[in-house]
Amino acid sequence: MSAATSTVMTMAQALNDALDVALDKDGDVLVIGEDVGRTGGVFRITDGLLETYGAARVIDTPVAESGIVGAAFGMAVGGLRPVVELQFMGFSYPAFDQVINHVSRIRHRSQHRFSAPMVIRIPYGGGIGAAEHHSESAEAIYAHVPGLKVVVPSTPYDAKGLLLAAIADPDPVVVCEPIRLYRAVKEEVPAGWYEVPIGPVGVEREGTDVTFIAWGAMMKETRAAASALEEEGVSVEVLDLRTVVPFDADAVVASVSKTGRVVIVHEAPRTVGFGGEVAATVAERCLYSLHAPPERVTGWDSVFPLKRSESQYLPDVARIVAAARRTLEA
Amino acid sequence: MSAATSTVMTMAQALNDALDVALDKDGDVLVIGEDVGRTGGVFRITDGLLETYGAARVIDTPVAESGIVGAAFGMAVGGLRPVVELQFMGFSYPAFDQVINHVSRIRHRSQHRFSAPMVIRIPYGGGIGAAEHHSESAEAIYAHVPGLKVVVPSTPYDAKGLLLAAIADPDPVVVCEPIRLYRAVKEEVPAGWYEVPIGPVGVEREGTDVTFIAWGAMMKETRAAASALEEEGVSVEVLDLRTVVPFDADAVVASVSKTGRVVIVHEAPRTVGFGGEVAATVAERCLYSLHAPPERVTGWDSVFPLKRSESQYLPDVARIVAAARRTLEA
Amino acid sequence: MRQVLTPSGGLDGTAPLDVELTRRLYRAMVIARVYDRKSTAMQKQGRLATYAPFEGQEAAQIGAAAGLEPDDWVVATYRDAALMWAQGYPWELLVAGRTGDERGGRPPDHVPVLPPSITVGGHMVHAVGLAWAEKIRSSGRIALTSFGDGATSEGDFHEAMNLAAVYDIGCVFFCQNNGYAISLPRHEQTRSDTIAQKAIAYGMPGVQVDGNDLFAVYETVHEAAERARSGQGPTLIEAVTYRIGPHTTADDPTRYRSDDEAVEWRKRDPLERVRIYLSERDAWDDAWEAAIEEEAAGEIDRAVSLAEAMPPLGPGEILDAMFETRPPHLDAQRRQLVGEAP
Amino acid sequence: MRQVLTPSGGLDGTAPLDVELTRRLYRAMVIARVYDRKSTAMQKQGRLATYAPFEGQEAAQIGAAAGLEPDDWVVATYRDAALMWAQGYPWELLVAGRTGDERGGRPPDHVPVLPPSITVGGHMVHAVGLAWAEKIRSSGRIALTSFGDGATSEGDFHEAMNLAAVYDIGCVFFCQNNGYAISLPRHEQTRSDTIAQKAIAYGMPGVQVDGNDLFAVYETVHEAAERARSGQGPTLIEAVTYRIGPHTTADDPTRYRSDDEAVEWRKRDPLERVRIYLSERDAWDDAWEAAIEEEAAGEIDRAVSLAEAMPPLGPGEILDAMFETRPPHLDAQRRQLVGEAP
Ligand SMILES: Cc1ncc(C[n+]2csc(CCOP(=O)(O)OP(=O)(O)O)c2C)c(N)n1
Ligand SMILES: Cc1ncc(C[n+]2csc(CCOP(=O)(O)OP(=O)(O)O)c2C)c(N)n1
Ligand SMILES: [Mg+2]
Ligand SMILES: [Mg+2]
């Protein structure tokens, strides 16, 4: 650990730093996945770790997602703390059976005798003009699996703090990492170990007229939309969910009870996206405070498009602002 | 096809009849899955089909869900109409990658040049005291996959008609079959080919005070709860969703706009269950008609329990009635 | 196919176990058979959920466990109660699991056995992970995973075998080829002549052994375990055996196999040949048989009583092991479940 | 390892193709290489999304296609443009796909080639299903699926191979072992000496062949295809080759391999040996080379122009191929997308 108390970093650097700190502190932590060693991973998040910690703890694997997650699960049951990297969310599905049928269940199945303190890191989301399967947002699918926690950082600070909290967590945590924010912004990130607690939303900005709720990659557009509206004198409260499960319903309800209006933004397809859960919760718990119907600004119910038509798919500032206007004019 | 115009049947028989009718009518239809031939399937839904149609069209396979779905997909792309049986929803996950990355996408990927007119039948739901993984309800996961249709019959008549519609559909359809309704009731089922259209909800009972929305296995408890309330003079409108995707939002909105109250019932875990989508849609589209917050009566966010504690998990009449009372007293 | 003890009780080679240990293992097979038959009977009385009998596979399971050290990991299936018990899993918890009680999945703290896998195929790689962890710790512990012929058709079998071989993981892959995956006979599951030869795909040794031969199974597993323990990596063992009963109590085997087949296999009964072997050495007689059968019945009855005396999980307790600490949403759901909140 | 044409252009056995056909295939390899290099160049200019070059694998791909009938199915990967083109997929659509245009995934109606698989492993069993459909129809058509060494580590490889063997499906499994799965060298992917020997696990023939030898690849694929066509089932072919370039344009191979390796492999260039072979038979000279290179450049330039001249999908069109008929919810979303509805 360096003497500096903090450094300006991208999210990619912050995640790398988190892994470095965890590997350094806890001999039970290891990193495992395709190309995580020699190349430092598709996104270089594990860069340099092989050199520092060796091939027994930074493990390059064959292309076998189910086997990787299943083996890491066995390691976790056996007392280690593996951090799995899957290359893209679209390649996480071969491991889905392991995740839903074993990783998320061993504590319940064995009534606390065994547990799986492991982390599955999954780069997700579009916006980089990638090939098919490289732009998926499937946080809602993982959120529907009882026994998993699911976090989605949107800033370098939160990314490091949430990843360290995930590694320290006694139960399995899926970390969805927004690909297009890996290197989009830099901010001060403290040196050494700190945790951003899994659960609480981040209230990024307080406001009184309308609540914006988003997470991960969509925070960028959401913040920009909030700024655009603030210039027009609209007071926007911006919540970064950060954790999808366990969902911080109380904070959402508190905010929407105050503003009476809510716009929920996500990149995943609309039908049964996590936005539905948020909107349902709002309707159930603060119906009488609502001045307008909740709005969801989401991806369409379609395959994520290729480079040339990507912009047709991704929610943008204009759509968010328009949705907010509808709530204000209702 | 028999001369009788209709026969009293269980859902299991109706599904068997549907497969018989389809195999008889269309030489491209085939049935494929584990133990579907000699034993007629775990639930005997394919009973007798091997004898009638032979091993080339009623195919017993090794235990390889991903391979079965993937091979059936290839067959469908090649012009056949395979009907896959997976043994339980908990064993559908090894095939999830094939479903989400290929089955649901080939039409889009090839811009209509290729398509996958195939059916995946999945027994689902609890209530029979089964072992782990044998009681899952994962319709919301399939519903979140763009490019799939998802139907969930609750009656023998609908089961046959929806399965035939699924077989006739030019695109892939997941048929979730409620295990505990396979032999729970009998009703008149017409002979020969008929279709229940994929999409429209079934309005089972009209009413004015509160709308009940459920599907599949939970229709039994939902109907019973409606009857209990009707005896007290509450007028309940009961919708059987039947199709989860494409979701018949208009019918739901029309009903809730009329009654102003809604109770949504499902057996799947609550967080990001399909009930969230329904409640969100209601809040978005008939907020001003609502007399009370929408209510969701669902399974807990837990592993489905084993036999001895199953009753702690399953939504029952009492919970549904209590939820309805809350909407009436709000 | 490796064989040491022929169906008629003769020796082909030297016995790998002394008479006293053989008697102990014979007794274990007797208890296992009592458990198995009792379970089927209880299921018919509605006291158990669906049950998957293992009659005919006792030598495979008891022999395999005998080849391990007491703290080696065992990761096995719904049909492996005898194996799991032999590695320390108490009968009463095995029964409890089959009554449909979650607490059946919780072995005592020192028992190195995972609760049985209900999904086919997924659990083998868990043994790889456990053995990998032990390798990293240089603990000297290894893992054995048991699975059926049918499980070898799953992709997860392939990934588990491949990963174990690539990293020299101390994992023994123990396949009980009992002839069927539910209704599908072995020769329709795969075109390879043996399951053992599938090891060639992974550069791993593969051994086919008579699974009804206690000595051969013991010897083969013990060799593979010591190979694993010494860092030389995994071995695939195909134990050729036969499921005498139905796939589960819900299954009707007449739909897919002839009675003759089971009759043939009864002649290769795994207990019978040990009985002959021991009696030829004056180490078995009717009186001892009667005594151990009575003891076995008592042991299993006690286990059943213990399991059936357990009160069901209390209201709300089904939500208490989802996480180490219940998060707020499960707190709220628990209050609803127990009726403390609407 | 089967070899017919040695790296120095000599024959080991008899040539399976006459000189004229060899010239045609040589020309195809030249075009493929032009396409490949052009694509890398275009990617650097930002005109293509990430590109996965296949330089060094031309003989494997062109030789494989030559072994098929024109209406045999091909199910291949992101690195198989030469193979797909040789089976009828137009260059301009291959380019269009790489510019990030969905219409690149739509081959003309008569072309029996699926759009390239981007996921590793999942597509092989699609070829099994296609060939199965042809078998049911007794059409005489078969399928070839192409995949890399890395793909053999996936569970789906195992399930595809096993199913194909069990049902005698007319599917050729064509593995281009190019030495790496991104950064992982072949020997760290699996412990088997060869990939070909994995066929033993499925009771299937497996052949290892010099993948840089046009003649050997052609002959081996042709034999396997005819075997498949005659109902004798699948074959696994391991074509040993080398990826001269990076995994993709986003990859830096210096992180995981030495330059020496590529230098060594350049000596086994798949075009070079055919060039020598033909020139020794007076069927190649500098003038012809110059001519076909110019033609190739023209052909690829035309394809690029066509692809780049395509207007992007119009607003809303990304929703138009999710189903045969757009259901109501996609209608509503489409109206939102094009701005006709809030
Ligand atoms: C992933 C999965 N698919 C299907 C099933 C249903 N199933 C239970 S046992 C079984 C057959 C397994 O055969 P085998 O591996 O030979 O074991 P055996 O039952 O003969 O001991 C099947 C298909 C399952 N449990 N898990
Ligand atoms: C299921 C899946 N996992 C991971 C990836 C990421 N990925 C793309 S190519 C590749 C390596 C494949 O190696 P190989 O099969 O040898 O083919 P090659 O690229 O060498 O042609 C990986 C891991 C993927 N595309 N799909
Ligand atoms: Mg078996
Ligand atoms: Mg490769």
Image: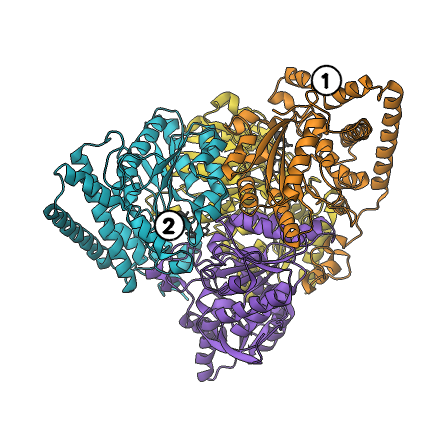
Chain colours: A yellow, B purple, C cyan, D orange
Instruction: Assign the C terminus of chain D to one quadrant of the image.
Output: bottom right
Disc 1 to disc 2, C-alpha distance: 66 Å
**Secondary structure of the residue carrying numbered label 1:** loop
**Residue D211 position (above or below residue A313):** above
**Of the residues shown, which amino acid type is indicated by label 1?**
Gly
**Secondary structure of the residue carrying numbered label 2:** helix
**Residue D299 position (above or below residue A144):** above
Residue A108: give its label.
2
Q: In this view of the protein, which residue sits in the foreground, A3 or D69?
A: D69
Q: In this view of the protein, which residue sits in the foreground, B143 or C249?
A: C249
Percent position of residue C65, x then y? 28, 38
Ligand 1 lies under 8 Å from the Cβ of mark 2 = no
Q: In this view of the protein, which residue sits in the foreground, D39 or B329?
A: D39
Marks 1, 2: nearer the viewer: 1
Quadrant in which ligand 2 is drawn = top right
Residue D10: give its label.
1
Q: Quadrant of residue B239?
A: bottom right
Percent position of residue D298, x then y? 88, 32
The residue that appears at 84% across and 40% down in the rendered structure is D308
Can residue A79 be spotted in the picture? no
